[in-house]
Image (cartoon, rainbow, N blue to C red):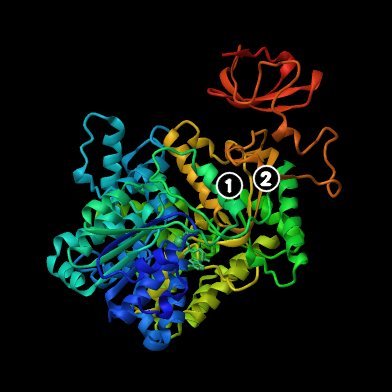
Amino acid sequence: MTESPLVKDLNSAQREAVAAPLGNQLVLAGAGSGKTRVLVHRIAWLMEQQSVSPHQVMAVTFTNKAAREMRERLTHLIGDRLGPRGVHSMWVGTFHGIAHRLLKAHWQEAGLSQNFQIMDSDDQLRLIKRIYQTLALDDSRWPVKQAQWYINNQKDEGLRPAHIDPGHDPFAQTMKLVYEAYEEACENAGLVDFAELLLRSHELWLKNKSLLDHYQRRFVAILVDEFQDTNSVQYAWLRVLAGHACAVTAVGDDDQSIYGWRGAKIENIQQFENDFAPVGVTRLEQNYRSTSTILSAANAVIENNFGRLGKNLWTDGGEGEHIDLFAGFNEQDEARYIVERVQDYLREDGSRARTDCAVLYRSNAQSRILEEAFLRENVPYRIYGGQRFYDRLEIKNALAYLRLISSRQDDAALERVINTPTRGIGAKTIESIRIFARDQGCSLYAAMQAALRNKVFSARAAGALNGFVALIDELEENVAQLTLGEAAELVLEKSGLVEFHRKEKGEKGQARVENLEELVNACRLFEPQDEEVTPLQEFLANAALDAGDGQADEFEDAVQMMTLHSAKGLEFPLVFLAGMEENLFPHKMSLDEPGRLEEERRLCYVGITRAMDKLVISYAESRRMHGNENFNAVSRFIREIPQNLVREVRIQSTVSRPASYSSSSATRQTEVDDFPDLKLGQSVLHPVFGEGTITQFEGRGAGAKVYVNFMREGGKWLALQYAKLEVV
Ligand code: ATP
Ligand code: MG
């Protein structure tokens, strides 16, 4: 084999995959085994050794951040030869990003308006609420969120309303109606949701053969990372595009499939072997990321799942340190501990960076307590996912102005800003515009102008509306002559948004103003790539797609905080898994369904395998959630890790604890002397709460308590002396 630098730092299985002849390939391997590395080297190899041009390659990544990293790594590997423009001309992005690019280029063929806008999940929910009003639907009977879920789900499965036969099921009948009305509203307003991007471009392939032909001839190789999390429509899209001639490399790990709840299909991996036959399958078994302790813990946890494709992951790295387990007596205590550990870690070795530390949690809501703890100690942190920069209220409002300037049809944007900041346009006026728009089948903006011409409003309302129309027109006129940064600045100032937040009391207003300033910065630094659209349009599309990766303080050295879902594909020397409690993780929504519980376990596997050198797991014995004090049992995933890999951490002094507190009591005590029949895992019957399973003991003698997870009532602490539990 040629000793190209492209294969020099690879093991033999990796080399085989990288240097394989052009053809379909599946790389199926566990976490940290170099799948993403193989994918990047494969692209470089194709260009260098097979004379494939960057123009002929498409790489699908899971996040925009991953796409950027991939470009950087390619530039590093072969950039000299291709020049920076070379790597840039390659299509790298998420399924959504690539579908969007296609629709932008072929909006006419796809039946879209030229300035169609991407609608995020908030806008989508608002739109469905409006449809509920029109259809006079009862939200308490058919929750709006459920309708949103339904619509997205149908689209992910590739289904339009016409494909759905609701039979006599009232739920399905109602949802179909909502879906139909929703489609019409999106069509009229020129709005496209995330799932629509894929579905629409898939339909475009099917109905426009010459276009499909063009792209099929263009792409010689398509490579997909994190293949286990593709959904039905993504898979169908890929299959059609690839046709018979294109070489597809799919890279994935069935144990890391964590988006089942959003329609991802693990089965696509097996399906791939059939549909894309012949497929060369490579398995990578050596893990290069983690210590053997961390890897053994991950393997032990995931072994509890059934129906895995099965793999053997090993490392010749050292054993490393124990996994630390910390029990906080409440969530504050837990957060304080994590911050202290980060500080100790940085103090121990001056060459370490904050970005080496990641705190991972199951739900976004958990971040606030942790954030406060970091803030108190002045440790910079950065959140990926959750309240991300482009998700913040003031940013969305600012973008809505820009969107409206760019397309008057954008109803969602108009709804957002027509009276923000307040300019005396009341709810009644807005409602009458909506009704008018509905009757006329036109955009809200057009309805507003028509209603103004017909003089249907009171003088006051008409004055306010005229002011708004004049503002948007004036802005559009000016923006056309300015750079993007200047345009953003002008819009923020003239719209009154900056002033509005400046007047807000307290730090929140201040933070909002700072965020708006940061948005102007982002506009200034924005480098347009796409010559077919204006820089503003490109910026807006990126902001909508990018929510999640686009934080302004990206380059500051900060502790990384994110949900487990967002941590996919990443790695960090020091990882904290926080809030490892039943009901939190595994999430309580998953406890009744074996399938979902297994998905939670895969998420835990993802979490553990992010750690390179050191893993710290923590939980809180009591936690305030939704205003109540909860006593959750220790997560079952902790119990699935072999004891010999774990070291319980005790803190002697720094924080005051309740007198009875002992960090080990909750995890180690497996029985109570006076009740020899009761053991961890034992099924019991309670006269009131019914059947449950013992998951914890605490204390001895008269003070002994037992924690039972009841099938009906959830988890409860009971005093053993009075509980009257029967063994079943
Ligand atoms: P995940 O499943 O988490 O996405 P992955 O299989 O994609 O993981 P990579 O991120 O590609 O794994 O690789 C994990 C780490 O191991 C990276 O730091 C990578 O640089 C390193 N690595 C991979 N292969 C080798 C190798 N042959 N020699 C040295 N380091 C390697
Ligand atoms: Mg990877």
**Residue 297 - label:** 1
Mark 1 nearby-residue class (10 Å; few <14, some 14–19, many ≥20)? many
Which numbered marker is on residue 481? Answer: none
In space, the residues marked 1 and 2 are separated at their CA atoms by: 9 Å
- Residue 649 point in image, percent of width and height: 75, 46
On the image, the x and y values in percent for residue 432 come to: 37, 52
The kind of secondary structure element at disc 1 is helix
Q: Is mark 2 within 8 Å of ligand 1?
A: no
Are discs 1 and 2 less than 8 Å apart at CB? yes
Percent position of residue 650, x then y: 79, 44
Q: Residue at x 28, y 35 (%)?
A: 172
Q: Quadrant of the N terminus?
A: bottom left
* Residue that appears at 27% across and 76% down: 56
Q: Is residue 350 visible?
A: yes
The reply, left or right, for residue 57 in relation to residue 366 is left
Assign a secondary structure to mark 2: strand
**Residue 466 seen in this snapshot:** no
Residue position for label 2? 646
> Tag 2: Cα neighbours inside 10 Å, few (<14), some, or many (≥20)?
many
User: Which residue, as the protein is rendered here, is positioned at the far left?
Assistant: 210
Q: Can you tell which quarter of the image residue 48 is in?
A: bottom left
| Residue 423 at x, y percent in the picture | 51, 63
Any atom of ligand 1 within 8 Å of the CB at mark 1?
no
Quarter of the image for residue 325 reads top right
The quarter of the image holding the C terminus is: top right
